[in-house]
């Protein structure tokens, strides 16, 4: 197995960070990242100690998320976040725009995950990969607010390969990556370049990549510093 060492390292990490707690809560989007994290968590903690939560907006499909939960035999629930988001939309018009609304959706999901984790004495498992971490492609205090990040050291292309070895369902592996933030939204469509291109650039392989794409990736990396650091206060010397 190509990723045997990687799997063992992640399993040890999960085991160590989960000590003294009842297990882990995972937001199951139906995408590959959450599926991989769920498969890894079950390998370490056992299916009885992993809880999945699918949080669609309205009529978004939960079929793939439920497929992963059933394949693994973990307990899971489905909660529609649309009624909560609608309250914010009515009170503040800026939440009717795609980007603020998308971030709000991610933050509502975070609140639900932590509610479940509090109730069960569990950790919230993050599902952000290295490619997304590098360019800040996650919502601050949303999907970026978690207790541990088991795959944050793996590029998206590596996550795809790891999923193959773990036996993640084929349709989950092959579907277009999306955070389900608005109708028709896909990660690569929103970014303007593919994950394969992004991973090449992040690894220093820029040959054949358009300057416009290189510049955008660099802007994203530099402009997202505030998502990757704890808030800083002014240090005044006495």
Image: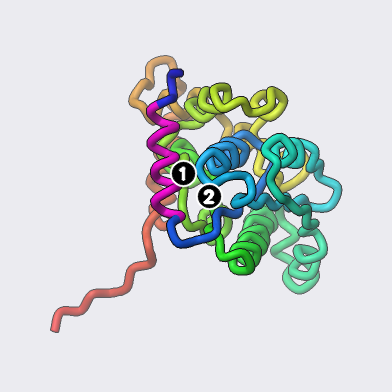
What secondary structure is the magenta-colored segment mainly? Answer: helix
What segment carries the magenta color? 5-18
Say which quadrant the N terminus sits in: top left
Asked if residue 81 lies in the magenta stretch, the reply is no
- The tag on residue 150 is 1
Instruction: Give the mark nearest the N terminus, 2 or 1.
Output: 2
Q: Quadrant of residue 41?
A: top right
- Disc 2 is placed on an element classified as loop
Instruction: Tell me, yes or no, if residue 137 can be seen here.
Output: yes
Q: Quadrant of residue 152?
A: top left
Q: Residue furthest right?
A: 59
Mark 1: few, some, or many residues within 10 Å (few <14, many ≥20)?
many
- Camera-nearest residue between 171 and 175: 171
| Residue 38 horizontal/vertical position (percent) | 59, 41
Is 128 placed left or right of 214 in the picture? right
Asked if residue 13 lies in the magenta stretch, the reply is yes
Q: Quadrant of residue 39?
A: top right
- The tag on residue 126 is 2
- The tag on residue 115 is none
| Residue 112 horizontal/vertical position (percent) | 67, 63
- Camera-nearest residue between 136 and 129: 129
- Camera-nearest residue between 100 and 203: 203
Name which residue lies at 73% across and 70% down: 92
């Amino acid at each position: 197995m190509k990723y045997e060492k990687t799997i063992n390292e992640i399993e040890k990490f999960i085991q160590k960070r989960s000590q003294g707690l009842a297990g882990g809560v995972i937001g199951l989007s139906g995408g590959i990242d959450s599926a991989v994290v769920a498969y890894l968590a079950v390998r370490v903690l056992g299916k009885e100690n992993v809880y999945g939560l699918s949080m669609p907006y309205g009529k978004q499909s939960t079929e793939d998320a439920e497929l992963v939960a059933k394949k693994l035999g973990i307990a899971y629930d489905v909660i529609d976040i649309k009624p909560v988001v609608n309250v914010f939309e009515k009170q503040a018009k800026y939440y009717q725009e795609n980007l603020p609304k998308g971030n709000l959706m991610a933050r509502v999901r975070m609140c639900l995950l932590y509610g479940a984790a509090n109730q069960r004495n569990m950790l919230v498992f993050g599902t952000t990969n290295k490619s997304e971490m590098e360019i800040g492609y996650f919502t601050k205090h949303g999907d970026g607010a978690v207790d541990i990040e088991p795959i944050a050291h793996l590029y998206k292309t590596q996550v795809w390969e790891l999923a193959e070895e773990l036996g993640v369902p084929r349709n989950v592996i092959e579907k277009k990556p999306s955070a389900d933030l608005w109708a028709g939204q896909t990660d690569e469509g929103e970014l303007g370049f593919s994950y394969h291109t992004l991973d090449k650039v992040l690894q220093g392989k820029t040959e054949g990549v358009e300057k416009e794409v290189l510049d955008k990736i660099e802007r994203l990396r530099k402009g997202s510093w505030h998502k990757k650091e704890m808030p800083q206060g002014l240090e005044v010397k006495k």
